[in-house]
Amino acid sequence: KGIYDIHIDLRHVPLLEHRPEKHELGLQASDIMTTSVTAIFPRASVGGLMDTLESCRHGAFSVVEEGSRRFVGILDRSTLLHVLHLGKRHGIFTESESPASAPAIVPYEEMLQQRHPAPLSLAKVKASLTLEDCAMHVDLRPYINMGCYTVQEHAAVMRCHLLFRTMGLRHLPVLGDDHTVRGIITRKDLLLGAEEHDLATISACKSVRTENSTACDSSADSSPGEAPTRPAEAAVETCCNV
């Protein structure tokens, strides 16, 4: 590896290789996905959304239907922060839980003026909200990405790798047959799968070396005049070169 690649590895930057790794051939999305998914509803209370943002540092949230939990789309953290920060100014907070036929929206141009897609600080958003605001509800449907890429649980990890590389994805929801969210995949999940495979390979090599060393010691003790044989030496070299 070059010096830049070495520094990328040392800093644990989630940079994927151009081609999928060999160990990804037999893996499915369910093998590497993160199952602890934080989901939100298309219409939620402002206070509940603030609690969700404070309780985790996820970069995006799966949006699901209330009741059926069917997947609706994905909403990134930055957009949610901007909507909550500018919502009162544009009157998108309502007391009623039922969605309006034509809900008011925060203009995208104004979010750009606030340096969107760069996220706002959570403290700044919290300072702009009152207790009355937190009791209000907000309709998130205009800001949800309903056309995002998704995969099924049995999708090949190689396909997920190619989607991240070619489409510039940051989050990939994994859905079940009933269209509910079973997990989510990020670049870190793909890299973690590669690291676990490397650790398993190293552990297997050490185990083979230990067995060979024990066999050689036993052979040397039983026949001092004979040269010890290493029948599994080629297997060790093959294992460590994978």
Image: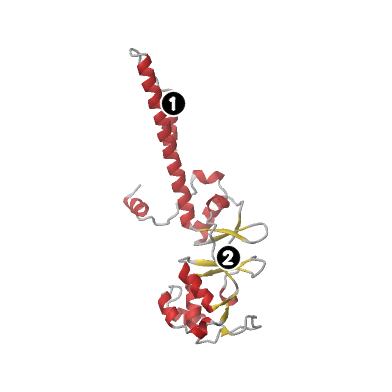
Q: Residue at x 39, y 25 (%)?
A: 214
Residue 121 lies in quadrant: bottom left
Which residue has dot 2 on it?
148
Q: Residue furthest top?
A: 225
- Residue placed most toward the observer, 58 or 101: 58
Q: Is residue 85 above or below residue 175?
A: below
Q: Residue furthest left?
A: 3
Q: Residue at x 42, y 77 (%)?
A: 115
- Between the C-alphas of marks 1 and 2, the distance is 50 Å
Residue 25 location, x and y as percent? 54, 44
For residue 18, say whether it is visible: no
Residue 5 location, x and y as percent? 36, 51
What label sits on residue 232 in the rendered view? 1
For residue 198, say whether it is visible: yes
As shown in the figure, which amino acid type bears the numbered disc 1? Ala
Q: Earlier in the sequence, mark 1 or mark 2?
A: 2
How packed mark 1 is, by other alpha carbons closer than 10 Å (few <14, some 14-19, many 20 or more), is some
